[in-house]
Amino acid sequence: DLRGTFGTRLVHRGESGSVRHLLAVLRGGTALIMLIDQDFRTEGVWVPFFGKLAHTPVGPARLVLRRNAIALPAFMERLDDGRHRTLIGPPFELPDDPTAATALMSRAVEEQIRRAPAQWVWWHRRWRRRPGGHNT
């Protein structure tokens, strides 16, 4: 809701017409931000994250690969004065495999967290699901 107050159009997973909206954003040349740093209840793949396998959404990688879109690592950091800084890295050179592409993008998230650990949502149970169906 906070993001929406600043004019950002949010598309919630499972929302009616969500896929159509995402594709329209890509066709329109507008930035599309998709989060991969949490274990959402969505289709995902197991990729390394801080030395453990973590269930990670694969949809962003599939969308980029299928639409031949440009994927950029982007991060927001809170500044001490209450403002925010946006960090945008160079485009990913993604492999054709969605799992390998997700792993590459996940490594960028891990690098950013190592750089500024206080900026990440640590209360999220990132490793709640385990490979083989063992949940914590």
Image (cartoon, rainbow, N blue to C red):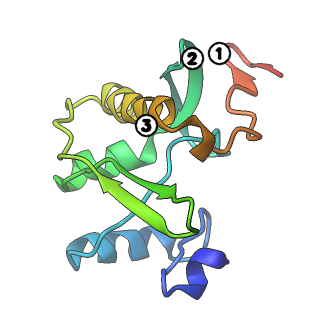
Between 1 and 15, which is closer to the camera in this rendering?
1
Q: Which residue is mark 2?
A: 53
Q: In the image, residue 76 lies at what x, y percent? A: 46, 57
| Left or right: 119, with 108 as reference point | right
Q: Residue at x 34, y 45 (%)?
A: 62
Q: Residue at x 22, y 80 (%)?
A: 28
Label 1 neighbour load within 10 Å: few <14, some 14-19, many 20+:
few
Name the secondary structure under disc 2: strand
Extreme-front residue of the structure: 81
| Left or right: 106, with 136 as reference point | left
| Left or right: 95, with 13 as reference point | left
Label 3 neighbour load within 10 Å: few <14, some 14-19, many 20+:
some
Name the secondary structure under disc 3: helix
Q: Which residue is mark 1?
A: 131
Q: In the image, residue 78 lies at what x, y percent? A: 54, 58
Q: Residue at x 56, y 59 (%)?
A: 80
> The disc labelled 2 sits on which kind of residue?
Leu
Q: Are marks 2 and 1 in contact (CB under 8 Å)?
A: yes
Name the secondary structure under disc 1: loop
